[in-house]
Amino acid sequence: MKKQKSITDILLPLGVFALIAVLWFVITGTEVVPGFLLPSPTKVAIAFVKDIPTIMGHTGYTIAESVIGMGISIVIAFFAAVIMDKFACIKKAFYPLLVVTQTIPAIAIAPILVLWFGFGIAPKVILIVIVCFFPVAVGFLDGFASVDADEIKLLCSMGANNIQIFRHLKLPRSLPHFFAGFKVSSSYCIVSAVISEWLGGTNGLGVYLNRVRSSYDYDKMFAVIILVSVLSLMVMAVISVLEKKLMPYRDK
Amino acid sequence: MNYILTAEGISKTFDDKTIFSGLDIHLPEGKTVALLGPSGIGKTTLMNILSGVMLPDRGKVTLCGEDITGKPGHISYMQQKDLLLPYYTVLHNVALPLIIKGVKKKEAMERARQYFDFFGLQGYENKYPSELSGGMRQRAALLRTYIQSDKVVLLDEPFGALDAVTRAKMQKWYLEISKELGLSTVIITHDTDEALILADKVYVMGEGLRVIDIENKPDDFELTEEFIRLKKEIVSLL
Ligand SMILES: Nc1ncnc2c1ncn2[C@@H]1O[C@H](COP(=O)(O)OP(=O)(O)O)[C@@H](O)[C@H]1O
Ligand SMILES: [Mg+2]
């Protein structure tokens, strides 16, 4: 099925963003709000450019944590889903636990993880895994379950074994569901890393944010807040490209 | 008579419901046999048993004298839906039975490609199933079925979902290619005309199983009085 975006679909949200930017300019330009509380867009841009080397160093660190955390999440989610798909009783036993992990507030366990695992990369990666694992695992599980019984019958009639059924039916069928979960996870991923760094660390955008907040550099803070959303958007864009590459048939 | 596929004494019960008991089916080599009956009578169940993906409660299925009861992979089976996998190209779909048998993907696709002309699918190799019309999808599914086994093919209402014009064309086409390829076919249908047009022998599944042999079909068989007579006979059995 082809999904064409019309021009208004693109223009409308762009217009809203533009409106917010204009409002920001106007509010800061007229000094309705004091400059130290809400820095103007130009000041934010200047702060960003001036501190680029430091910011980039921290950004690299945050991205590295996110990629490692996400990678581990996907690997664990994949194997957990395969096992749960194979053994219904394991799925019954562990699925509720998975749901419970989703109700734990990330911000509350981050300090505990720091307490347990120190100020290094471990507590950050663990937090990302806790947050990102679930949507990906559920994506795989739903995907595996979406295989039609008649399709399995077809492969059986060809003499296929379980691995071949997995390779030719379950895996490709799970891809769209996996990507749906992956996108949700990835939108939490960078934010989780930043929160975790904020609450205890030596490197990363969270640490930087915390520092500039202590020194009242709100222009730098705003710069990094925008950077974090841009990074999250970029991650989602990369995933979309990957999705197109792996599932070319979806555009037909 | 030389039978390539036989099923003898087949019985199947789901829960408390006996679908059939002591059923015999004989498929002569190079011929087409039709299973005709109203829906819910157990035609698909019988196909599942013949193909080996389902075990009968009792009875035996043999292919060329070899017992294949409950052993899938020997004869090919095209189910009611075409079941072309949406994420593979037509060529990849058609080559799948070879890939499952352990042929390398590239070689399997090369071998499958050679039949595209014959099945009227030339030019569709690299398309995805969603880009094909109903008739084309059916051809692709038939080619996949043929590549799976060129001995015996089981077809479960292959043309049921097509419009009347396309269906008539496909029936003619199948008559030609099955003759040319020497296929032995078991075909399910609930359409009396289709059974009479395609089959050399019709098993009518109604109250019990009745066999109707159709020998020496003339050209334009569907316009003869014999055709009308057989049709009346079958309708009275259903
Ligand atoms: N796996 C199954 N479990 C229980 N009942 C089944 C199963 N498969 C088919 N049946 C029942 O067997 C009967 C025959 O079904 P089917 O072989 O699909 O009929 P047909 O193909 O002639 O329409 C139906 O009443 C159906 O509900
Ligand atoms: Mg049926």
Image: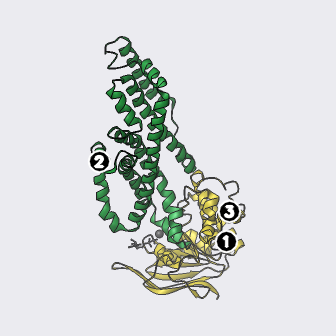
Chain colours: A green, B yellow
Q: Is residue A154 visible?
A: no
Q: Is residue A211 visible?
A: yes
Q: Is residue B12 above or below residue A38?
A: below
The kind of residue on which mark 3 rests is Lys
Tell me which numbered mark, 1 or 3, is placed earlier along the sequence: 3
Q: Residues within 10 Å of mark 2 (few under 14, many from 20)?
A: few
The image position of residue B151, as x and y in percent, is 64, 77
Give the residue displayed 62% in from the left and 71% down from the top: B102
For residue A115, which numbered disc appears in the image? Answer: 2
Disc 3 is placed on an element classified as helix
Horizontal relation, residue A250 to residue A195: left or right: right
Q: Which residue is mark 1?
A: B178
Q: Residues within 10 Å of mark 1 (few under 14, many from 20)?
A: some
Q: Chain of mark 2?
A: A
The kind of residue on which mark 1 rests is Ser
Q: Chain of mark 3?
A: B
